[in-house]
């Protein structure tokens, strides 16, 4: 990767204790980021299918085509814009998906649902900061929003591991 220097922070996993269990956050790899992009691109279509299911027989062809066009536009925004993908991945669902991708390296039994159970609104920022730190997106001592000590329900231990 000529011209690209990952932070030294990205070379070490982060050991997290959450509700008495130890988890290892691994740096996100290029394949993880590609999976996250695919997930983000598919998200508008998943939402469209959910809405179509809710509408059921009330959905006309015209409504379905409008919803499809909207999904294509949103998916294209993600595909063609780092900002569009960043918005999706910074959402609560995005953080959960990235957490799942990070955890699955050392915890192959991890599911998106299980990763989601580890996150709540009070700890979302802390999880995002830890994912950013372990993947080298920001320096460990860099001031970032949500870097305050975690609340009681948040992970309580974070140590670097080789």
Image: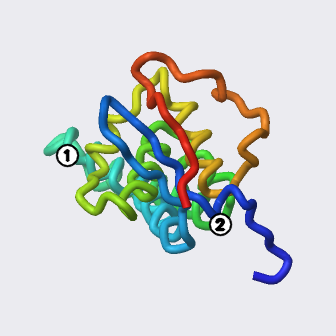
Which residue is the site of mark 1? 53
Between disc 1 and disc 2, whose residue precedes? 1
How many callouts does the rendering have? Answer: 2
Q: Residues within 10 Å of mark 2 (few under 14, many from 20)?
A: few
Q: Specify the label residue 115 is tagged with.
A: none
Q: Quadrant of the N terminus?
A: bottom right
Residue lying at the far left in this picture: please name it: 57
Query: Residue 58: which quarter of the image?
Result: top left
Per the rendering, the mark at residue 80 is 2
Against 61, is 18 above or below? above
- Rounded to the nearest whole Å, what is the CA distance between mark 1 and mark 2? 28 Å
Hey, which residue is sitting farthest top in the picture? Answer: 152
Q: Nearer the viewer, mark 1 or mark 2?
A: 2
**Disc 1 packing (10 Å; few <14; some 14–19; many ≥20):** few
Helix, strand or loop under label 1: helix
Image vertical order of residue 59 relative to residue 120, above or below:
below
Estimate the x, y position of residue 76 in percent, counting from the top left.
57, 64
Q: Position of residue 92 (x, y in %)?
A: 47, 37
* Residue pictured at 60% horizontal, 22% vertical: 149
On the image, the x and y values in percent for residue 7 come to 75, 60
* Camera sees residue 66: no
Q: Residue at x 65, y 66 (%)?
A: 80
41 or 154, nearer to the observer: 154
């Amino acid at each position: 990767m000529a011209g690209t220097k990952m932070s030294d922070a990205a070379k070490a996993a982060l050991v997290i204790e959450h509700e008495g269990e130890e988890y290892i956050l691994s740096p996100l790899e290029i394949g993880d980021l590609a999976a996250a992009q695919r997930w983000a691109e598919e998200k508008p279509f998943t939402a469209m299918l959910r809405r179509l299911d809710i509408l059921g027989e009330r959905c006309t062809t015209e409504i379905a085509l409008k919803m499809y066009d909207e999904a294509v536009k949103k998916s294209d925004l993600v595909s063609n814009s780092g900002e569009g993908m960043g918005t999706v991945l910074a959402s609560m669902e995005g953080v959960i998906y990235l957490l799942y991708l990070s955890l699955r390296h050392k915890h192959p039994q991890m599911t998106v649902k299980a990763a989601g159970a580890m996150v709540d609104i009070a700890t979302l920022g802390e999880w995002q900061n830890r994912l950013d730190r372990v993947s080298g997106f920001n320096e460990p001592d860099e001031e970032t929003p949500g870097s305050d000590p975690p609340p009681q329900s948040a992970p309580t231990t974070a140590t670097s591991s080789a």
